[in-house]
Amino acid sequence: MARRLVEAGHQVKVWRRGLGPVSAAVADADVVITMLRDGPAVEEVLTQALPGLREGATVVEMSTIGPEAVLSLRGLLPSSVNLVDAPVLGSVGPAAEGTLTVLAGGDLSACRPVLSVFGTVRELGPLGAGAAMKVAVMGALVPAQVLLAETFAYGEAHGVGRQALAEVLAETPLGALAARVAAPARETRYALGLAAKDVRLGTWEGATMARAAGARLAAAEDAGYADRDVTSIATFVGAAPPSDAAGGRAVRVNPGSVAATNGMYSHAVRVGDMLYVSGQAAFDERGQLVGEGDMTTQAEVVFQNIGKILADQGADFSDIAFIRTYMTDLDMRMEYGAVRRKYLTGTPPASTTVEVSKLFMPGLLLEVDLIVALP
């Protein structure tokens, strides 16, 4: 995108974190473009840029951060600086070719020629309209790719080849997207971690499909897929085909992101829309005890593991119906409670806490089991 601006005759300075003060980079600029990972990153950089922004400059925010974050930036910037939100649709190829779709909100009078260098500019209305449109579009495209990944996993679990299924889907409105998911890209054009972030931005209360897709993507992130292309969700889902394909009402749940059990139990069992989670203790991915003698550390590990199990099933901490805690020393309940309150916010679930003389392995201070109402 920077190259296209240079080729169009604009004077361009490029800055990223680690290249000196951003205030010096934006000094005397008519237009300042930000394209960063998320809202906090944009706020951090623009706060540092404030001393260098000249009166009358236009800041064009092109990250995917959602309309609320954009409006928050308006409050951060002085009134003498114009703000436009203009996230894009398209990845590396369209960026190089100048065929991106720019989704713009706000007053474009000072930056319309700059934005047109990138591709087709759609002027959508007041500030925040472009950000809202981007989140809405990704709220359809990303869950659709997760759904297709599950579709291919189901097909393979039942003897339907991926290529054959892709050929049939090619005759439907999902054809082009199915072809991409059927053959996950080796080059990262749109990182799975960014897709997960984009879906989270658009997950409003009642958005069940976005929420479930976000949980799948979060589990893939935990498994090390964050920097791969989003189409790699098909590889992740395919590595763990539908666990209930063989039938049965009790479905065992053992996410790969949580340390393996000893084979004598499952981390959780799903029955209908209820999830019963086994006692979780402070073990890392290798099954090694973490934080011996340290209640705060052990509690953090326990709740992180619980979060991974919940995410694997499309749930989060707000879905916990009942939590039971076993502690070897109730005098440590203040340290435990401080960690627990970070994860269990709002109205708490039903709860029991008991002191026990010892747990199943020396050094353990804590074990927590749950009952969860799944979405």
Image (cartoon, grey):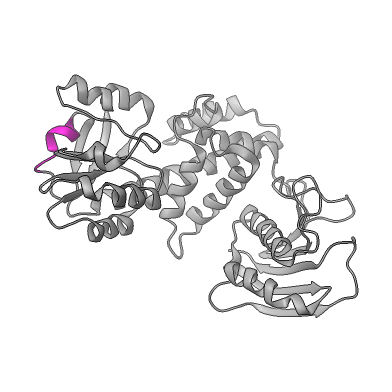
**Point 83% across, 63% down: residue:** 364
Residue in the foreground of this view, choosing between 211 and 77: 77
**Point 14% across, 22% down: residue:** 9
230 within the magenta span:
no
110 within the magenta span:
yes
Q: Which residues are magenta?
A: 109-116
Taking 362 as reference, is 348 above or below it?
below
Left/right of residue 46 with respect to residue 78 in the rendered view: right
Q: Is residue 133 visible?
A: no
Q: Is residue 316 visible?
A: yes
Residue in the foreground of this view, choosing between 331 and 252: 331
Left/right of residue 81 with respect to residue 102 in the rendered view: left
- The image shows residue 240 at horizontal and vertical percentages of 70, 41
Left/right of residue 290 with respect to residue 357 in the rendered view: left
Residue that lies at the very extreme toward the top in this rendered image: 7
Which SS type dominates the magenta stretch?
helix
Residue in the foreground of this view, choosing between 233 and 368: 368
Taking 133 as reference, is 96 above or below it?
above
Q: Quadrant of the N terminus?
A: top left
